[in-house]
Amino acid sequence: MSTGLFSIARTALLAHQTSLQVVSHNVANAETPGYSRQRPMLSANTPIRMPYGNIGTGVAFNGIERQRDALLDQSFRTASSLLGESTTRRDLLSQVEGIFGEPADAGMSASLDQFWASFSDLATSPGSLSGKAVVQQRGKQLAQLFNDYDTRLTQTREQVTSRLDALVSQVNQFAEQVAELNGRIVTAEATGTVASDLRDQRDLLIDDLSRMVGARAEPQRDGSITIVIANSTLVDGTSASPLRLEMDPPVPPPAVMPSDIPVRLRLGNSVDRLAPLAGELKGLVDVVNTDVPTLRSRLDAMASTIVSAVNSAHSAGFVFNGNAIPGTAAGNFFDPGTVGDPVRAGTIKLFADVANNPANIASSGNANAPLDNSVALSLSALRNNSSAISYTGPNGQTENTGFATFFRTTVTRLGLDVRGATDDSSVRTILVDQADSRRQSVSGVSTDEELIQLMRVQQSYVAATKLVKTADEMLQTLLSLV
C-alpha cells in the first residue's frame, strides 16, 4: 500500500512541478508581444483493477496546451489589413494635401485671381509699362506655382516609391523567417508535442504580414503554415517566393511618356501582376499609381489650357515700340511647348520675349491704336469663362468648367479623399481594438489569474510532499512490526 502511495506522490510531485514551470513561464512572458498563454494538461493515470474495485495510480502530465483561437486570429488579421490600408492612405494623402495648402494667400486660387486682375488693371492703363511689368510678374508667379506643385508631387511620389520598395524588402524578410520557422516547428512537433513558443513567433510575423500585405494563413497537417497574398502563395512549407517591385511602362510606348510611370508587383517567377492588393501595400500602390497621377493630370490639363487660352488671346494683340505705328504682332505670352515636350504643370513658363521684356506684353488689339485695351480685357475675361477647361478624367467623366472652379474641384476632391481615409482609419482602429481584445481574452496572459493558479499548484505540490511523508510513516510502522 505504501509503495502505491509513493508512486502516486511521485507522479503528483512531477506533474505539479512541471505545472509550476508552465505558470511561471506565463507570468514571465505576460508583456511579451505575441505570446500565447499556455496551460498544463493533467489527467488521472490508468487505475489498477482489484477484486474490490479500481484503484487510482496518481496523475499524469499530458503536455502543454497553447491557448489560441484560429478564427479570432483571422478576424484580427482581416481588420488589421484594412486598417493598414486606410491609415497609410490617410497619412500619404494628408501629405499630398499639404502641397496645395489651400486656402492660402500664396495658393493657386489667389495666384489666378492676381493674374487675371493684373490684366484688368492693365486695361485701365493699356500703355503703362509698369502695368505690363506687374502682368509679367503675376504670370511668372503663376507658372512657378505650377512648377512647384509638380516638383513636390514628384518628390512625394519618389518618397512613397522608396517606402514601397522598403516594404517589399521587409515582406520578403518576414516571409523567409516564416518559412524557417515552419521547418523548425515541423521538426519540433514530429514527436507529437506542440512548439508553442515557435508558433508564437510565427504568428507574430503573420500578424505583421497581414497588416502590410493582407496575408492569409492556411494551417497544414504537419504543423506548417501556408501564407497566401492576393490569391498567390508567398510561403509554402520551408519555401518563400520573393515579392518584386517593377516599373510598368505603357506598351506600346506613347509618343509622349507620362510623368508618372505606374509600378506593379510580381510574386516569384510569375509573369502576372499581383492582384488584388491589400494592407499597407495597397495604400502605397494606390497613391503611386492613381492618386498622384490623377492630381498631376489635372494640373497638367489646367496649365496646358491656360497657356492655350492666354496665348490665343495675346497673339491677337499688338505691341508698340515707343510711339511707332503700326504695332507688331505680339506673339505668345507663355511658352507653347512642342509636340515632344508639351506644356505641363512642370514645364509651364513665360515665352522668352515676355520674360525678357514686359514691353512685349500686348494690351491693344488694334495695330494703329497703342491705347486700345481690347486684348487686356479679353485676357481679363478668361477669369469668368465657365467652360474654359474640358477635362476627361480616368473614370471617363468630362468636366467643362472655369479655371478657378476646376482647381477648387481638384482640391475639394483631395480633401474628401483625406476625410474618407481618416474616417475609415478611425472606424477600423476600433474594429482592430475589438478584435484584439477578443483574441487577448483567449490567448493573453492575466497576471492576476496566473498568480491564483500559481498558489493553487503550489498548494497541490505541498500536499503531495505531505503524502510522501504519510507514506513514509506508514512504511516505518509496518517495518517496526516485523
Image (tube, grey):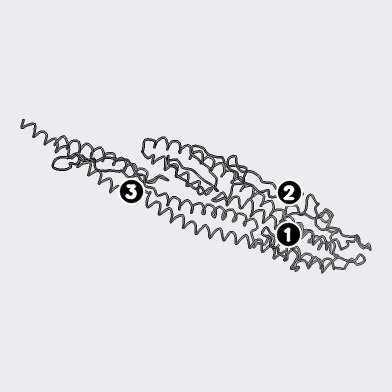
Picture residue at 42% right of the left edge, 49% below the top: 70
Which secondary structure lies at badge 3? Answer: helix
Viewed as shown, does residue 172 lie left or right of 331? left
Viewed as shown, does residue 310 lie left or right of 482? right
- Dividing the picture into quarters, in which one does residue 388 lie? bottom right
List x then y, in percent, for residue 367: 91, 64
- Dividing the picture into quarters, in which one does residue 298 lie? bottom right
Indicate the amino acid at tag 3: Thr
Label whose residue precedes the other's in the sequence (1 or 2): 2
Residue position for label 3:
447
Q: How many C-alpha atoms fall within 10 Å of the one at disc 3: few (<14), some, or many (≥20)?
A: some
Indicate the amino acid at tag 2: Met
Residue position for label 2:
257
Which secondary structure lies at badge 2? Answer: loop
- In which quadrant of the rendered image does the C terminus lie? top left
Q: How many C-alpha atoms fall within 10 Å of the one at disc 1: few (<14), some, or many (≥20)?
A: many
Q: Report, in whole angstroms, how far the alpha carbon at label 3 lies from the one at label 1.
A: 63 Å
List x then y, in percent, for residue 410: 66, 61
- Dividing the picture into quarters, in which one does residue 100 lie? bottom right
Q: Nearer the viewer, mark 2 or mark 3?
A: 2
Viewed as shown, does residue 171 lie left or right of 36? right
User: In the image, is residue 133 above or below residue 73?
Assistant: below
Residue position for label 1:
302
List x then y, in percent, for residue 464: 20, 40
Q: Report, in whole angstroms, how far the alpha carbon at label 2 lies from the one at label 3.
A: 62 Å
Pick out the residue farthest to the right.
325
* CB-based contact (under 8 Å), mark 2 and mark 3: no
* CB-based contact (under 8 Å), mark 1 and mark 2: no
Indicate the amino acid at tag 1: Met
Label whose residue precedes the other's in the sequence (3 or 1): 1
